[in-house]
Image: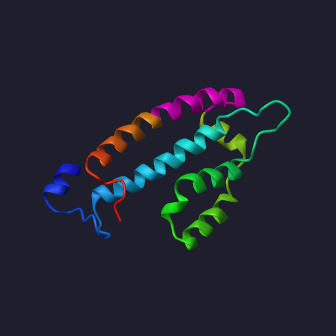
């Protein structure tokens, strides 16, 4: 797709255009957020502490990964939406486990798979100078 869009002048490196490459870049950035969020969600509490709320983890990972690509309005809307994030038992159900220890095992596997996809996309986008498309 990248080669085809470049060969057909569908990618503009100076202004916003609707292209598959730009959509891939957006998905690539979102994948980094998802990887970070699931990695944090999979961490067990350290001794003497309790598990952090998914909404807090979501907000923090968003601020580290995606926020810099969004306008102030989008950032504030996202942070408001994070308040509706369900608690951990909901996520346990999603990955078919009952405890944080079981979730940690599953989420670590998911994060490793996401890392591989992310790295492959990173290389493809970087090879063509597309990591900073407008």
Q: Give the residue displayed 82% in from the left and 30% down from the top.
A: 47
Snapshot quadrant of residue 97: top right
Asked whether the viewer can see residue 131, the reply is yes
Point out the image quarter for the C terminus.
bottom left
- Rendered view: 12 above or below 98: below
Q: Position of residue 6 (x, y in %)?
A: 18, 56
Q: Which range of residues does the magenta coloring cover?
A: 96-113
* Residue depicted at 35% across the width and 53% down the height: 24
Vertical placement of residue 75 versus 54, above or below: below
- Along the horizontal axis of the image, is 45 left or right of 112? right
Q: Main secondary structure of the magenta part?
A: helix
Q: Nearer the viewer, residue 77 or 49?
A: 49
Q: Is residue 101 left or right of residue 1?
A: right
| Residue in view at x 68 percent, y 43 percent | 90
Whether residue 112 is in magenta: the answer is yes
In the image, 62 versus 88, the foreground residue is 62
Residue 3 drawn at (x, y percent): 18, 50
Nearer to the camera, 84 or 111: 111
Specify whether residue 61 is painted magenta: no
Point 31% across, 48% down: residue = 125
């Amino acid at each position: 797709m990248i080669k085809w869009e470049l060969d057909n002048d569908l990618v503009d490196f100076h202004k916003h255009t609707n292209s598959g490459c730009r959509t891939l870049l957006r998905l690539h950035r979102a994948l980094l957020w998802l990887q970070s969020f699931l990695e944090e969600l999979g961490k067990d509490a350290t001794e003497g502490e309790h598990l952090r709320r998914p909404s807090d983890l979501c907000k923090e990972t968003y601020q580290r990964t995606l926020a810099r690509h969004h306008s102030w309005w989008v950032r504030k809307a996202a942070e408001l939406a994070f308040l509706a994030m369900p608690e951990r038992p909901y996520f346990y159900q999603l990955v078919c486990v009952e405890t944080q220890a079981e979730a940690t095992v599953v989420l670590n596997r998911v994060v490793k798979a996401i890392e591989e996809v992310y790295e492959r996309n990173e290389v493809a986008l970087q090879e063509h100078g597309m990591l900073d498309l407008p």
